[in-house]
Image: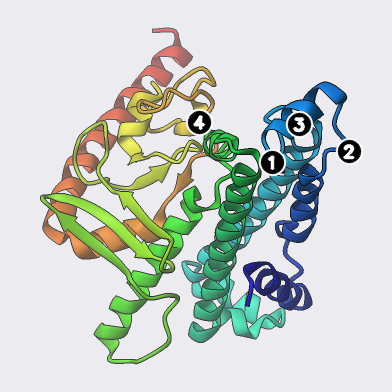
């Protein structure tokens, strides 16, 4: 079965369940088909196109004015929906018993069960995978028609804009959620379904990674070394640019006290790696990853916890001493 038909069938099935946004794969292919014909082009560009056979020239009003803006809007919608639903799922998984009871009384029985959480997690991973493949295929088709690398350049651009679904911090959290579930099953002796196969926590030459083969052609590797302290991330957070740091290290880089937190960071503060601005206020706390690292690196985690506790207490003491002096005028 051709991918386009497979994708359309998948999205139709999903619309009957949750009606998520998707990539207009068929519509975008039709836009590219127009590029094979030259009747929409100005005479000067049409003559250039003639020299390139059936391919569309690099200067194309149809593609530049329709194809990329349309694809960008759809990618924003897909990533936004995925992030929101993954956040809700993982918040429910880590919620207190009281909150889970409230969810149960509201009629969402499936969401509070172990199997229900696994199934919803698997659905989200499949949604991320098939949309990532759809975007990759349509951009490859663009480059083939245009004999250019603008499709790949666009992919690089959207990565900087943080609308690449495989870069989402919530995908990292789902991977950690999957490994945590597997470990819990081993400890309890239960045998339940998992989110996906080929996902593992790896320490290679002293460097920790999350590695996941989502399919034969899509593999995600996430480096879990903080580039500030050069150690395994502790109390990890992901900035909006996608880079992962220890919470205390991120506060230090943003020039804020741990009491005020990253929300108090000045918008002009930059990510230490990519130098992007305005990346601290929307930072995501990676709770599932924190649980995974605590379980996988027990000795390191306990030692780091003691060190960080002392440092946080010191920062809190200095903060409140300063506030008292400011209030009293001493």
The numbered dot on residue 55 is 1
Q: CA distance from mark 2 to mark 3?
A: 12 Å
Q: Are marks 3 and 4 in contact (CB under 8 Å)?
A: no
**Is 212 on the left-hand or right-hand side of 225?**
right
Mark 1 Cα shell of 10 Å, populated few (<14), some (14-19), many (≥20): many
Q: Are marks 1 and 3 in contact (CB under 8 Å)?
A: no
Mark 4 or mark 1, whichever is nearer to me: 1
Mark 4 Cα shell of 10 Å, populated few (<14), some (14-19), many (≥20): many
Q: Is residue 46 above or below residue 89?
A: above
Which SS class for mark 1?
loop
Residue 302 visible, this angle: no
Q: CA distance from mark 4 to mark 2?
A: 45 Å
Sequence-first tag of 1 and 3: 1
- Residue ID for mark 3: 60
Which SS class for mark 4?
loop
The numbered dot on residue 39 is 2
Sequence-first tag of 4 and 2: 2
């Amino acid at each position: 079965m051709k991918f386009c038909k497979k994708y359309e069938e998948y999205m139709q099935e999903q619309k009957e369940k949750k009606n998520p946004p998707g990539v207009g794969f068929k519509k975008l292919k039709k836009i590219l088909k127009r590029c094979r014909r030259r009747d929409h082009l100005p005479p000067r560009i049409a003559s250039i196109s003639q020299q390139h056979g059936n391919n569309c020239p690099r200067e194309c009003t149809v593609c530049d004015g329709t194809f990329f803006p349309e694809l960008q809007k759809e990618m924003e919608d897909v990533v936004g929906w995925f992030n929101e639903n993954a956040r809700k799922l993982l918040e429910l998984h880590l919620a207190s018993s009281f909150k889970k009871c409230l969810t149960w009384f509201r009629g969402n029985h499936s969401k509070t069960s172990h199997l229900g959480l696994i199934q919803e997690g698997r659905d989200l991973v499949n949604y991320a995978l098939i949309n990532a493949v759809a975007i990759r295929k349509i951009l490859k088709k663009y480059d083939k028609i245009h004999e250019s690398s603008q499709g790949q350049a666009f992919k690089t651009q959207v990565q900087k804009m943080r609308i690449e679904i495989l870069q989402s911090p919530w995908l990292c959290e789902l991977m950690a959620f999957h490994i945590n579930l597997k470990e819990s099953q081993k400890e309890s002796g239960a045998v339940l379904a998992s989110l996906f196969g080929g996902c593992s926590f790896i320490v290679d030459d002293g460097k920790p990674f999350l590695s996941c083969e989502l399919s034969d052609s899509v593999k995600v590797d996430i480096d879990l070394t903080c580039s500030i302290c050069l150690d395994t991330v502790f109390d990890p957070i992901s900035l909006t640019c996608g880079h992962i740091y220890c919470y205390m290290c991120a506060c230090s880089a943003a020039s804020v006290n741990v009491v005020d937190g990253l929300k108090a960071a000045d918008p002009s503060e930059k990510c230490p790696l990519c130098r992007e601005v305005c990346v601290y206020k929307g930072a995501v706390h990676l709770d599932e990853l924190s649980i995974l690292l605590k379980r996988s690196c027990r000795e390191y985690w306990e030692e780091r916890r003691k060190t960080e506790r002392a440092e946080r207490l010191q920062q809190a003491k200095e903060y409140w001493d300063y506030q008292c002096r400011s209030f009293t005028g001493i």
